[in-house]
Amino acid sequence: MLTKPTIKELLRKNEEHRCPPSSFGGVCVKIVAVANLPSRFGHFQIVAFYSEKDKKEHTALIKGDVFGKENVPTRLHSECLTGDAIGSLRCDCRDQLTTALKTLGKLPEGILLYLRQEGRGIGFTNKIKAYALQDLGFDTIEADHMLGFSGDEREYDIAAHMLFSLKVKSIKLLTNNPQKITGLDKHGVKVTARLPIIIPPNEYNKFYLETKQNKAGHLLGRKQSEQELEQGDNIVVQ
């Protein structure tokens, strides 16, 4: 039987929550709704956040009791409509999302933050424009640069504030991207370990993944990831 949501008190406090302009770099994230969410990956609580910074709704899926906990397995997943919802083979986003949810669903506690940062922060329309450039032979980084972007426009201050709102003390981050660790650390989140998510490439995303590894510094080597896990982490994500 599903239990009642355990963050009702946080929700009540957030009803009158106001962020002073000087707090947290001016970023304000509020918990606005919470409910139980049974899924094919397990039973979660789903928490709706609203950010005053980008005027968007972000989501946390929570497994178990994470409040006040350390070393909470956590996945930061940026929205990808084409991959997550439609099943595009041009990226590995859907595979990473489902793998993370399967992993967290089997653990006593964990968090998945679903962030509204489509196309590595450039938005849906620009992502499709980048796809069109990739169809002409440019890689994903080159395409972003041609559109006037850095190659990764995502920020992690909102994610950090979401974790602070959930009273999480430290996390183990499910990621292949060291920039996420750097971005969270910049905003005061303690990341105690990296848990890799190694997804086998397909014929449509092989060049995309090679570009992420060679140009964006993503750690996609299976051997390196296995060595990292042997140094103390006990969750193997495959």
Image: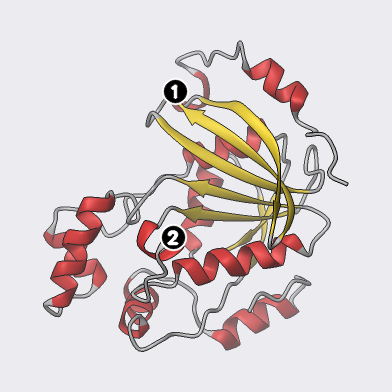
Count of labels in the image: 2
**In the image, is residue 187 above or below residue 19?**
below
Q: Which mark is residue 110?
A: none
Q: Earlier in the sequence, mark 2 or mark 1?
A: 1
150 or 147: nearer the eye?
147
Rendering coords of residue 62 (x, y %): 70, 46
**In the image, is residue 218 above or below residue 74?**
below
Q: Quadrant of residue 54?
A: top left
Q: Which residue does the image show at 35% across and 55% down from the upper left?
A: 120
**Given the image, on which type of amino acid does mark 2 rest?**
Ala
Q: Which residue is mark 2?
A: 85
Rendering coords of residue 185 (x, y %): 55, 47
Residue that protrudes farthest toward the right in the picture:
1
Q: Which residue is mark 1?
A: 26
Q: Quadrant of residue 142?
A: bottom left
Determine whether the residue tagged by mark 1 lies in a helix, strand or loop. Answer: helix
Quadrant assignment for the C terminus:
bottom right
Q: Residues within 10 Å of mark 2 (few under 14, many from 20)?
A: few
**In the image, is residue 24 above or below residue 17?**
below
Render colour scheme? secondary structure
